[in-house]
């Protein structure tokens, strides 16, 4: 069984990837490689995965270069597919995690499974008007799948998953998931620094509740992201002595931040299709307070792993009830629903469905 994973063209894929789609791809590819699937990941130079990396070029540092870089990325992927086919080592399946390679599917014979990471209204309607017959789609939550109802090329709904071991107990943690030497302190906001994620609202929540907060994340090289940081974040941080910013934390730093926080805030202003941050918090035994947008009500279990709020006022009020959340209940919920093994099981079933029943390899059952 040979699967080619196609990554987003701008970022690298590695254990420390900042982007959610890159994290999911890295986690899934590792699970599949460990199950005996021959995995190749087509990604930017500098990527690191369990199986084979096929470099499609250097990641670009400016958004103005995206169109050129995406064309380069796609052309090199097509060349790889053609070359492997001519060598008698054709890929059995192309799993597109890039968000756009599936538009070139008519140029190849292998089945293409495209995972849709974004809300439906983020995609141009024309993209789904003439889908190549070898393309199938996967949605990453039931909420997202509902928005794509009526699109008969949606083959399944496999939820995202995380590597639970990365957020498990570390030496020195007590039975409640806190460091024995110090209780959990402060709030945490973690993610991409941009208007739709709205970290400025997390700062407002922390300020109104008089609780320290850490903003941790990456400012992508898009001009409007940088303007947002300068206009909405930098000034607020300078006026809040109990707030700090950590740029592009490593995986080890991120895991520590999540484990040490009193609560993780998720203040998205769009209908999220999933939330790795909410899953990571649950795996760490840390409560989440999230705006009730998109799939977040699927991931945050009200009163068990955290609370859902409809705006800043409700989020501030929810902070007064953090004592009601039990760390072990959060971790058990993560084990039950968010494991990378469960995600891989779901994709194995979906791969088998997409492939001809007569050619399904034994590793997929």
Image: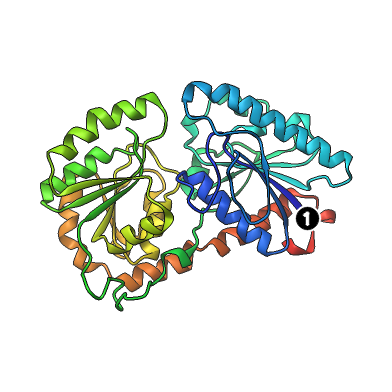
- Quadrant where the C terminus sits is bottom right
Write down the residue under mark 1.
Answer: 1
- Quadrant where the N terminus sits is bottom right
- Near mark 1 (Cα within 10 A), the count class, few <14, some 14-19 or many ≥20, is some
- Quadrant of the rendered structure where residue 59 is? top right
Q: Is residue 69 visible?
A: yes
The residue located at (37%, 36%) in the rendering is: 219
Say which of 83 and 330 sits in front: 83
Question: What percent of the width, then of the height, locates residue 4?
Answer: 71, 46
Question: What percent of the width, then of the height, locates residue 250?
Answer: 41, 52
Q: Is residue 314 visible?
A: no
Say which of 86 and 361 sits in front: 86
Judge left or right: residue 262 versus residue 336: left
In the image, residue 326 sits, relative to residue 318, either above or below, namely: below
Say which of 288 and 262 sits in front: 262
Picture mark count: 1
Question: What percent of the width, then of the height, locates residue 72?
Answer: 65, 27
The residue located at (64%, 38%) in the rendering is: 152
Question: What percent of the width, then of the height, locates residue 236?
Answer: 17, 36
């Amino acid at each position: 069984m040979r699967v080619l994973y196609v990554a987003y063209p701008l970022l690298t894929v590695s254990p420390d990837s900042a982007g959610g789609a890159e994290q999911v791809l890295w986690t899934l590819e590792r699970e599949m490689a460990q199950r005996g699937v021959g995995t190749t990941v087509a990604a930017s130079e500098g990527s690191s995965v369990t199986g084979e990396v096929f470099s499609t070029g250097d990641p670009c540092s400016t958004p103005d270069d995206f169109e050129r870089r995406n064309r380069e990325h796609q052309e090199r992927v097509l060349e790889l597919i053609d070359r492997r086919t001519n060598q008698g080592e054709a890929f059995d399946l192309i799993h597109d995690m890039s968000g756009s390679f599936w538009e070139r599917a008519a140029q190849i014979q292998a089945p293409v499974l495209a995972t849709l990471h974004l809300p439906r209204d983020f995609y141009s309607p024309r993209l789904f008007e003439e889908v190549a017959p070898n393309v199938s789609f996967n949605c990453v939550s039931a909420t997202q799948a509902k928005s794509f109802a009526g699109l008969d090329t949606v083959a399944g709904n496999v939820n995202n998953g995380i590597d639970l071991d990365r957020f498990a107990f570390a030496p020195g943690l007590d039975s409640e998931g806190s460091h024995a030497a110090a209780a959990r302190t402060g709030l945490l906001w973690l993610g991409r620094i941009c208007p739709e994620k709205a970290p400025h609202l997390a700062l407002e929540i922390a300020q109104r509740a008089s609780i320290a907060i850490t903003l941790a994340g990456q400012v992508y090289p898009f001009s409007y992201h940088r303007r947002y940081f300068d206009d909405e974040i930098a000034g607020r941080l300078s006026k809040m002595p109990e707030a700090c910013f950590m740029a592009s934390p490593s995986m080890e730093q991120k895991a520590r931040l999540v484990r040490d926080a009193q609560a993780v805030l998720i203040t998205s202003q769009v209908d999220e299709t999933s939330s790795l941050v909410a899953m990571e918090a649950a795996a760490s035994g840390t409560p989440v307070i999230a705006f009730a947008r998109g799939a977040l009500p699927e991931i945050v279990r009200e009163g068990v792993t955290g609370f859902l709020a409809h705006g800043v006022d409700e989020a501030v009020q929810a902070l007064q009830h953090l004592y009601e959340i039990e760390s072990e209940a959060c971790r058990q919920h993560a084990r039950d629903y968010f494991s990378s093994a469960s995600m891989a099981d779901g994709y194995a079933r979906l791969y088998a469905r997409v492939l001809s029943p007569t050619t399904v390899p034994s590793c997929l059952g």
